[in-house]
Image (tube, rainbow, N blue to C red):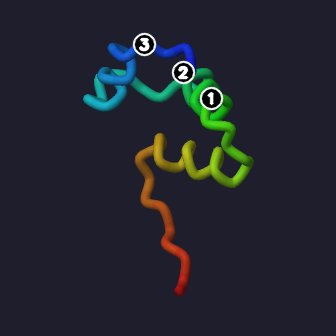
Amino acid sequence: MAGVSSEYYLRLKQERDKNPPQILNALARALQLDIRAMEYLYQLASGRDIPQPDL
């Protein structure tokens, strides 16, 4: 869907590879993410804690 092989997805999931920006951009395009969703994707990929909104 994003021009990324299933083997590469597996390597990402197993943390055997980093999340290069070109892969994240391809995923964002394939999923038609808006800017906020794309920022969230980058936060998830960074491994940093994501602040939860106050409810």
Q: Which numbered circle lies on residue 5? A: 3
Farthest residue to the right: give it.
35
Q: Position of residue 52 (x, y in %)?
A: 49, 72
Crowd class of label 3 (few under 14; some 14 to 19; many from 20; radius 10 Å) = few
| Residue 33 vertical placement versus 24 (above, below) | below
For the point 63% across and 51% down, which residue is it? Answer: 37
- CA–CA distance between discs 2 and 1? 6 Å
Report the residue marked by disc 1. 30
For the point 30% across and 30% down, which residue is it? Answer: 15
Report the residue marked by disc 2. 1
Q: Which numbered circle lies on residue 15? A: none
* Mark found first going from the N terminus, 1 or 3: 3
Image quadrant in which you'd find residue 22: top right
Q: Disc 2, disc 1: CB below 8 Å? A: yes
* Mark found first going from the N terminus, 2 or 1: 2
Q: Is residue 27 left or right of residue 48?
A: right
- CA–CA distance between discs 3 and 2? 9 Å
Under circle 2, the secondary element is loop
Amino acid type of the residue that numbered disc 2 sits on in the rendered structure: Met
Amino acid type of the residue that numbered disc 3 sits on in the rendered structure: Ser
Viewer-proximal residue, 38 or 3? 3
